[in-house]
Amino acid sequence: MTTGNILLVEDEEKVRHLLKRIITLEGFNVQECANIKSARRLLDDTPVDVVLCDVMLPDGNGIDLVTYIRERQLPAEIILLTAYGNIPDSVRAIKSGAFDYLTKGNDNTRIIPLLFRAMEKVQLQQRIQHLETRIVNSYASFQEIIGTAPGIKAARQLAAQAAPSDAPVLLLGETGTGKEMFAQAIHNASNRAAKDFVAINCSAIGKDILESELFGYKAGAFTGAAKNKKGLMEEAHQGTLFLDEIGEMPLELQAKLLRVLESGEFIKVGDTKPTKTDIRIIAATNREVTKEITEGRFREDLFYRLNMFTVQLPALREREEDIPVFAAYFMQLFAAKSGKAVSGMTSDFVMQLKQHDWRGNIRELKNVMERAVIVAQGPELTPETLPLEVRWHKGVRQHSGTFDLADVEKEHIQWVIRYAAGNKTKAARLLNIGLSTLYRKMDEYSLIK
């Protein structure tokens, strides 16, 4: 039974393999790296709960990795290991945001208990985040879903028709199109509105943790299961359970979910008796479900149970007429939040917004507008307040005014890294250069790694 995702960063191969074996025996899923560079790449692409990292590594200090994780607000706790413990280093580590600092050899017996404590902190933070999301979304209604484009109007109408029933709803759409807001609005318009709306992102956690989060477990079911745990199926009793990114759910858990939909009962991890629950399921995915079924990654029978009401949310680029409305809303929101007297947008600014592809949809637009308000120097938002990737249209980037070749190269690398959402491997591929060359260029231009 896996109890969390651990990243082990250690350059000594024998030590790394020994630690991995010990930690794996405790039920953790362990990934390993030999240096900081590979650890950064993995952290950029893979969800990790706790990092166990050596301080002295071939390409840097483990404390630098703590800073990297904290600067990017990654939801991981860090435990540092060193062969030579000293007070200044331990103080520096804790001040940088490390969970704890251990000396190899002297503190070996503390490693496993510390991993469990760090994991408990991560899971508590996840629950707090879920609670905050529920509070923020608790007032969502169909009237607050902005937009007059035909696609969003059709989605809003169908969701409103489905809301009063207990029928499952499947929300389809790209990341950032507002699937959770739709799910909350459906719940708030249903006869279950007085009960809990419980949400979980199926792509954010590993298979075994997802199983225990959804279905709960009995005490003694696996190492570390000291007491019974209620799963979200019980937490959402008589309310609504929102399964975001259900396309990431493993097939064996899809089978257990199908049983809940068909019989209203499930079996907890480590239990032999079924537990009954009365919940409404709303699911969402950004994947093409029919393709997932054909390729064997999604159960066809589960799809037929979920798609009684299938609501397709349009991408923002398909709602060009709604982009200025969203932009004005976010401008007013962030101007009030920051206390800045920003009250308008130039026509060129709005044109740039309409021409952008918005791969991140409304979520991306929200972030862009917050940045624009922060950097604005006057009462109007102009194209200069937009990030470089938004000032790029149909393959042509707006020129910054510099003609120095090094400056142009630096600007282009920055733009491509942002375009790749910080994924260095993807950025190197887009630039058609090796990853090591990209890191060398980033060092040369003092770009943040």
Image (cartoon, rainbow, N blue to C red):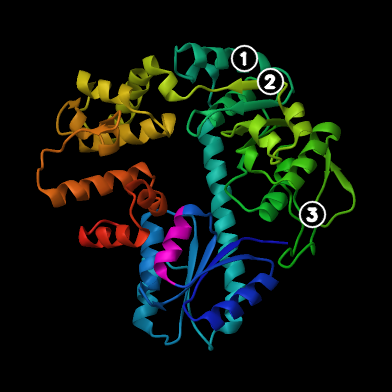
Alpha carbon distance from label 1 to label 2: 8 Å
One can see residue 278 in this view = no
Q: Which mark is residue 309?
A: 2
The local secondary structure at tag 1 comes to: helix
Q: Which mark is residue 269?
A: 3
Residue 115's spot in the image, x, y percent? 58, 69
Say which label, 2 or 3, has the lower sequence index. Answer: 3
**Mark 3 burial class by Cα count in 10 Å: few <14, some 14-19, many 20+:** many
Q: Is residue 339 above or below residue 20?
A: above
- Split into 4 quadrants, where in the image is the N terminus? bottom right
Q: Nearer the viewer, residue 266 or 415?
A: 415
Residue beneath the point at 34% across and 50% down = 432
Left or right relative to 196: residue 386: left
Say which label, 1 or 2, has the lower sequence index. Answer: 1
What range is drawn magenta here?
35-44
The local secondary structure at tag 3 comes to: loop
Residue 121's spot in the image, x, y percent? 56, 60
Question: What residue does disc 1 label?
Answer: 158
Classified by dominant secondary structure, the portion drawn in magenta counts as helix
Q: Is residue 41 magenta?
A: yes
Q: Please report contact status of discs 2 and 3: CB closer than 8 Å, yes or no.
A: no
Q: Is residue 31 above or below residue 391?
A: below
Under mark 2, the amino acid is Phe
